[in-house]
Image (tube, grey):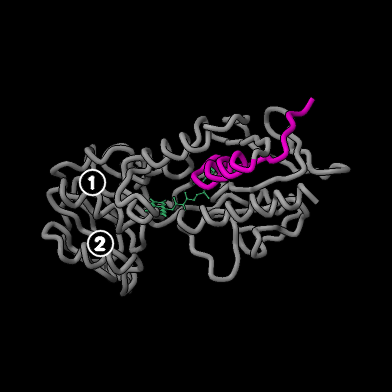
Amino acid sequence: MADVAEVTIIGGGPIGLFGYYCAGLNRRSVQLLERLDRVGGQLEHLYPEKPIYDVGGYPKITGHDLVEQLKQQAFQYDGRVRTGIVAQQLDPLHEGYRIHTNRGLYESPVVIVTAGIGEFIPRRMNIPAIDQYEGRGLYYVVNQLSDFDNQRVLVVGGGDSAADWALAIADRAKSVTMIHRREGFQCHADSLIKLRSHGSVSLIPLRALRAVVGTHAVEAVLLQEASGTPLEEPLEVDRIIVAIGLIPGTQLFTEWGLTMAGNEILVATDMSTNRPGVYAAGDIAKYPGKVKLMAAGFGEVATAVEAACRYLDS
Ligand SMILES: Cc1cc2nc3c(=O)[nH]c(=O)nc-3n(C[C@H](O)[C@H](O)[C@H](O)COP(=O)(O)OP(=O)(O)OC[C@H]3O[C@@H](n4cnc5c(N)ncnc54)[C@H](O)[C@@H]3O)c2cc1C
């Protein structure tokens, strides 16, 4: 026997949670499937304590607190929320779809895919023996900002995540050095201005990590120029945050007969995919001009639910 609802949402990240709310607002029966043990997506699992500044209405809120707000907003409506459920296969029915999971079947006329980047697999440094320092000063995921209190920290990466981490710890760390192998840092202009003007932060472009030094834990790093020329002088640090991106794990959706653009699902302006009744929103959705920010994703999933309601009514 399958669990049935009018709308099935696949992925309980921020965008899936807001989609659940939108479905409730339209008084549609809804079920949300999340592969991990709790909802919240990247916010809950990758940066619960990091402040977020660019969600409308919240000048500053942590990842965890935003998830709590989204849950409160969504779960005012009754529905089915299932965690530990991996959506694996999508089969068409006479009307709608059957979703095969690791634990049972789910059916609905409408499916909204908000599966983000799939699994959360941080891109790792390709440096021999570096992994021995994980849990001993090397971080790919930061769960507690207090780990960096009064520490000398190296942040590797030049994008928004790296800049966000550098800013989040700048006031509590002894020093923050942010290196990037390219000439320019690609984070928001405001982050760059704040980092440049912070007394504890040094930004060094055209530098890459060559090796980590330390007997039991991180004690120093060796760097190299972007050209590959090694720098002899070690840089003494106690902590390293590697923020060079995540490896998308969304290939599964190709097998669902969905048209992909690389790792993302191609959508039309109403967030519909090439399969009738299947929509996508959030990090997994792709269209010209796409911006991978929650602010954009919330709008996308609201659009998807509105389009889904019209589809259900027709
Ligand atoms: C370090 C860092 C800092 C960031 N800071 C900001 C910021 O300040 N502001 C901002 O706007 N954005 C920020 N982002 C980006 C933001 O987190 C994402 O845009 C957002 O999480 C996308 O939400 P989503 O719901 O689409 O996907 P996700 O958050 O990735 O959630 C998708 C969910 O779907 C689940 N799932 C995947 N596959 C399946 C499956 N087959 N079956 C069931 N469930 C599945 C996953 O487990 C996950 O919980 C940051 C990202 C990182 C990594």
Q: Position of residue 40 (x, y in %)?
A: 47, 39
Q: Is residue 13 magenta?
A: yes
Instruction: Please name the amino acid that badge 1 sits on.
Output: Arg
Amino acid carrying mark 2 in the image: Leu
Q: Residues within 10 Å of mark 2 (few under 14, many from 20)?
A: many
Query: Which disc, if any, is residue 223?
Result: 2
**Which residue is at the front of the view, 19 or 120?**
19
Beta carbon at label 1 within 8 Å of ligand 1 = no
Q: Is residue 200 above or below residue 35?
A: below
- The disc, 1 or 2, on the residue closer to the chain's N-terminal end is 2
- Hey, which quadrant is residue 133 in on the image? top left
Residue at 73% x, 52% y: name it.
Answer: 310
| Spot occupied by residue 80 in the image (x, y as percentages of width and height) | 63, 29
Q: Secondary structure at mark 2?
A: strand
Q: Which residues are magenta?
A: 1-26
Residue 58 part of the magenta-drawn span: no
What residue appears at the point 60 percent right and 66 percent down from the top-left corner?
287
In the image, taking residue 118 as reference, residue 43 lies left or right, namely left
Mark 1 nearby-residue class (10 Å; few <14, some 14–19, many ≥20): many
Mark 1, residue position: 239
Q: Secondary structure at mark 1?
A: strand
